[in-house]
Image (cartoon, grey):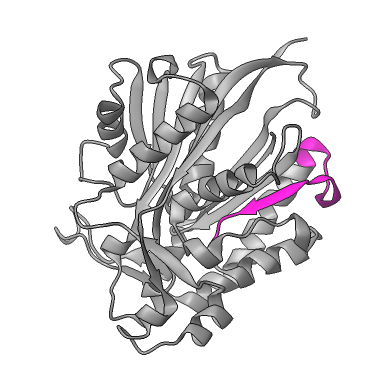
Amino acid sequence: MSFIRSVVLGCGSYLPEKTLTNFELATMVDTSDEWIVQRTGISERHIAAEGEFTSDLATAAAKAALADAGLTIGEIDMILVATATPDDTFPATAVTVQRKLGMLHGAAFDLHAVCSGFVFALSTADAYIRASQAKRILIIGAETFSRILDWTDRSTCVLFGDGAGAVILGASVQDGTREDRGVLTTHLRSDGNHREKLYVDGGPSSTGTVGHLRMEGREVFKHAVGMITDVIEDAFSATGYTAQDVDWFVPHQANIRIIDGSARKLGIASEKVVRTVAVHGNTSAASIPLALSVARDDGRIKRGDLVLLEAMGGGFTWGSALLRW
């Protein structure tokens, strides 16, 4: 019996030209390269230029993904942009990207699940494709977190960076087995009881201001590994695969200790873990597609590989996706 799967057709990324190193940060707040690296694994991050918006980053990543897939924008049915830092309150940043790409058909909308945004968007796009509501969907994770950071708060300003990554999913008729290419399973969760642990203290309805990111770092770390492994175990249960079957583990790039702790708890070998947090920092919804693009471009991720994705973000939100490249 034939089965429609959502297969990755192409991927791309974009990072702003400016980098901000730990040594430069040490001249701005009371911190040091040693302190940041030891606690987070981050050495540098990219910062959007003045006048460079989330939609600009997203559009550049989208163009790279289209070129990689050998597609034109006319062959895309829908654009989903996962972001917590939109250009404007409205319209959706996805609509702005749609305009910048010259797309005059289809639909475009934003999806907001903070750092889990890309996994949530991937799951949403997969549902549209499997329901035959779209054939090709452009999924973008894009952030300019530098715009919502309190640059006097050394506990948060050292963690985040700007960037964008994009993936194009396309419908493909498969056999309906776990050996199929494409998205095999996704699992999403949220729990609003943890809001105060990671949030932005502003918004149109609450304060009328943009606000700044606030985080209880120890509390986030305490919950992260358990929540992440929960949805990954769900993915294994749904497919019958185990940690030993995974070719590449591509986690949200938040903190090296969370990444490595999750891999150890799951029994995933260290050499199978894709890590980009050292040079990207935490780029929220952009981190997974950025890491995917890096690992595909350097030859690690290849056609037929089993790839495991996971993320956790403010809310809390968290989710996993298991796909065959």
Vertical placement of residue 85 versus 224, above or below: above
Q: Position of residue 251 (x, y in %)?
A: 61, 55
Where, quadrant-wise, is the N terminus in this rendering? top right
Residue 14 lies in the magenta-colored region: no
Q: Quadrant of residue 25?
A: bottom left
Q: Nearer the viewer, residue 194 or 278?
A: 278
Q: Residue at x 37, y 39 (%)?
A: 60
Q: Quadrant of residue 262?
A: bottom right
Q: Nearer the viewer, residue 289 or 227?
A: 289
Residue 160 shown left or right of residue 296 in the figure? left
Q: Residue at x 59, y 65 (%)?
A: 224
Residue 321 shown left or right of residue 203 in the figure? right
Highlighted magenta segment, given as a residue range: 237-253
Q: Position of residue 54 (x, y in %)?
A: 30, 47
Where, quadrant-wise, is the C terminus in this rendering? top right
Q: Position of residue 131 (x, y in %)?
A: 55, 17
Q: Residue at x 76, y 25 (%)?
A: 180
Vertical placement of residue 212 versus 273, above or below: below
Q: Position of residue 49 (x, y in %)?
A: 26, 57
* Residue most extreme to the top: 1
